[in-house]
Image (cartoon, grey):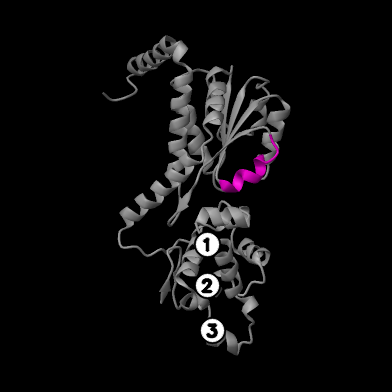
Amino acid sequence: MSVTSGIMLSDNMGASKDAMDEEGNAAADLGLVARIRESFDSLTATEREAAQFILGHLTDVLVCNSVELSQLSGISQPTLSRLYRKLGYANAGEFRRDVRRVHRPGSPELSRHTQCDDLVADHLRRDEESLKRTFEGIDRAQLSSACQAMATAPHVAVVGYRSSYPVALHMREQLMRLRGNVDILPNPGQSIGEDLVDYAAGDVIVIIGVGRRLPFFSRLIDVMLERGLTVVVIGDISARNAVIGRNVAFFKVVLNSHVLTSFTAAFALIALMVDEVGKCLVDTEDEVHARIEGINDCFDALDELED
């Protein structure tokens, strides 16, 4: 049994080579996982590393060009090209088309059946790598500009759907401790248009897009830009195409998967951004402290939180 770090390539995964030969199936009919399984023992150590990376980063494979994928994986372009050919693909384009057939960006990667000696250590390693890559990719000037806008705008809206909603809710809760007029959208069970009509030029909208997004994600960005809002987008690499050519501040979150996706890096980025907003409010520090004290007074008056 051959095992990659992304997926267990066990004997019960698909038909055996002999069975497929008997059925007259050509190699081109094999899916990505079956091709890697059939070829794994014949691959060089570097090619195996490349195959392992691919199975754990299918979204990156779809949205990165060859140069970017080589930089991201640390594997040379010639090695990747050689691997594609060994797996029976004519070129990188044919390989990506087959990946697209089995994977939608934002879905869990194929690393669901990972074997590891220490699950706790493996989760820690994956999250540390996600945090490192997320924070290394931050444009400091863009971070400062976006957070300054969030600190001073008349109104701020934080938008998130599906898996992005709890991330958006957390950001709103943190910002509310520093300033007023921060909304979470959409409200449960409601459409978003009724709320967005109240936002105008000078306001800020933060759109969270980690994991799979709704079809109108790009249109939401465009409509907000047309209305003159400052738009901040927080998303994984698959959200990049939605911001290309648009005047937005984009912060990329590097996700990782084991059984399901870890959003640790997304919440860490939110914490950093809120701290940066707080730094931008240093000139109104007394007002911020007064607001926090007012919130605590409300908690006490309601006896809402335990001591």
> Which image quadrant: the N terminus?
bottom left
Disc 1 to disc 2, C-alpha distance: 10 Å
Question: Vertical placement of 73 versus 232: above or below?
Answer: below
Task: Classify mark 2: residues with Cα within 10 Å, few (<14), some (14-19) or many (20+).
Answer: many
Q: Are marks 1 and 2 in contact (CB under 8 Å)?
A: yes
Find disc 3 in the rendering and name its residue: 17
Tag shown at residue 54 = 1
Q: Is residue 165 magenta?
A: no
User: What percent of the width, then of the height, locates residue 142?
Assistant: 56, 30
The kind of secondary structure element at disc 2 is helix
Secondary structure at badge 3 equals: helix
Q: Position of residue 77 (x, y in %)?
A: 58, 61
Which amino acid, mark 1?
Ile
Residue type at mark 3? Lys
Image-based side of 140 in relation to 240, left or right:
left
- Residue at horizontal 51%, vertical 82%? 16
Alpha-carbon span between mark 1 and mark 3 = 22 Å
Residue lying at the far left of the rendered structure: 307
Q: Quadrant of residue 247?
A: top right
At 66% from the left and 68% from the top, the residue drawn is 91
Mark 1 closeness class: few <14, some 14–19, many ≥20 residues within 10 Å: many
Q: Is residue 170 visible?
A: no
Q: Determine the secondary structure under disc 1.
A: helix
Residue situated furthest right in the rendering: 226
Q: Which mark is residue 36?
A: 2
**Magenta part of the protein: which range?**
237-246
Identity of the residue drawn at 49% across and 59% down? 56
Residue mark closest to the camera, 1 vs 3: 1
The amino acid sitting under disc 2 is Ile
